[in-house]
């Protein structure tokens, strides 16, 4: 039930609280499973659902792939949800999972499929970060490279989900690739902002609905700058700051 590597952190009991004011049938079902399972079979929670379904059990999850297994072991790392079983997760992401041909040139990815790739990329980034913390930087880089190969930008355009991968490359010591990704994603964001600026000339009524997209791009530029600064890449951080300043002023002009 508890991976050998985490045996020293095993706890005698799992304490949690239910914060819901009302009990729905789905919540009652989960509570019934927890009350009667007695650790005889593994209980998994999906990583793709809202944390509202986790019943405040977040501190007792073990991440083994694209799912979180409930286990009597406390997670000590606040950086991501679930204690990462790097051996099990590596086996699943790198050897067992089939990614459905996402890497096939010209394949069509609808918005639902693209949305799911955010979770896939994040899973790879979590595994890479955990491996880097264990001192296995070469394996961490291998994991990140595999993710980029399976989900190339030609089929899965960059979005906010690429930022954890950039952090992963920094953590693995591959500064060159990290900076390259920062440059590519920031250039994409700038093109989007330029497009929105052009769209603003078509009329306030139509353009007003683009405010959320504009803010989202500015947020991602700010995040890239913070990541670069955190890893000592001051030149890149300054570039992001300049972009943020320029388009931040444009935002004020267009929406205030």
Image (cartoon, rainbow, N blue to C red):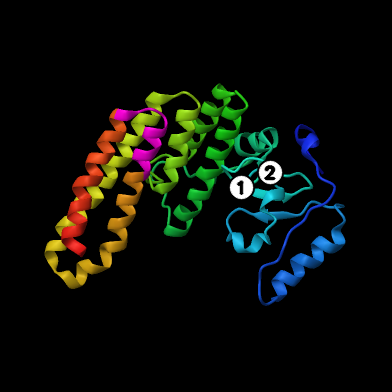
- Majority secondary structure of magenta residues: helix
Left or right: 190 as drawn, with respect to 181: left
Taking depth in this image into account, of 9 and 178 the one nearest to the observer is 9
In this rendering, is residue 153 above or below 235? below
Residue in the picture at 49% in, 33% down: 168
Task: Name which quarter of the figure residue 34 lies in.
Answer: bottom right
Nearest the viewer among 36 and 106 is 36
Q: Specify the quadrant of the image occupied by residue 84.
A: top right
Q: Position of residue 97 (x, y in %)?
A: 62, 42
Q: What residue appears at the point 34 percent right and 50 percent down from the top-left corner?
A: 219
Is residue 182 toward the left or the right of residue 254 in the image?
right
Between discs 2 and 1, the one toward the N terminus = 2
Extent of the magenta region: 223-234
Q: CA distance from mark 2 to mark 1?
A: 8 Å
Q: Which residue is labeled 1 in the image?
A: 81
Kindly indicate whether the residue at mark 1 contacts the one at mark 2 (C-beta within 8 angstroms): yes
Say the numbered circle drawn on residue 20: none
Dot 1: element? loop
Badge 2 element: loop
Residue pointed to by mark 2: 75
């Amino acid at each position: 039930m508890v991976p050998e590597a985490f045996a020293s952190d095993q706890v005698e009991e799992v304490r949690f609280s239910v914060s819901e004011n009302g009990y729905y049938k789905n919540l009652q079902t989960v509570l019934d499973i927890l009350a009667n399972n007695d650790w005889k079979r593994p209980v998994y929670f999906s990583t793709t659902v809202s944390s509202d379904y986790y019943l405040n059990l977040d501190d007792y999850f073990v991440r083994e792939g694209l799912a979180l297994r409930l286990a009597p072991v406390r997670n000590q790392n606040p950086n991501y949800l679930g204690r990462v079983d790097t051996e099990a997760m590596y086996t699943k992401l790198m050897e067992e999972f089939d990614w459905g041909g996402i890497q096939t040139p010209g394949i069509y990815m609808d918005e639902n499929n693209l949305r799911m790739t955010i979770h896939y990329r994040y899973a790879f980034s979590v595994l890479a970060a955990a491996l880097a913390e264990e001192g296995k930087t070469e394996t961490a880089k291998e994991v990140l490279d595999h993710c980029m190969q399976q989900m190339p930008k030609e089929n899965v355009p960059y979005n906010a989900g690429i930022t954890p991968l950039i952090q992963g490359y920094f953590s693995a010591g591959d500064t060159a690739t990290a900076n390259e990704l920062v440059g590519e994603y920031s250039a994409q964001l700038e093109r989007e902002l330029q497009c929105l600026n052009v769209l603003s000339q078509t009329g306030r009524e139509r353009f007003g609905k683009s405010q959320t997209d504009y803010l989202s791009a500015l947020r991602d530029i700010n995040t890239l700058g913070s990541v670069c600064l955190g890893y000592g890449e001051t030149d890149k951080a300054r570039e992001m700051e300049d972009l943020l300043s320029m388009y931040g002023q444009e935002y004020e002009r267009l929406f205030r």
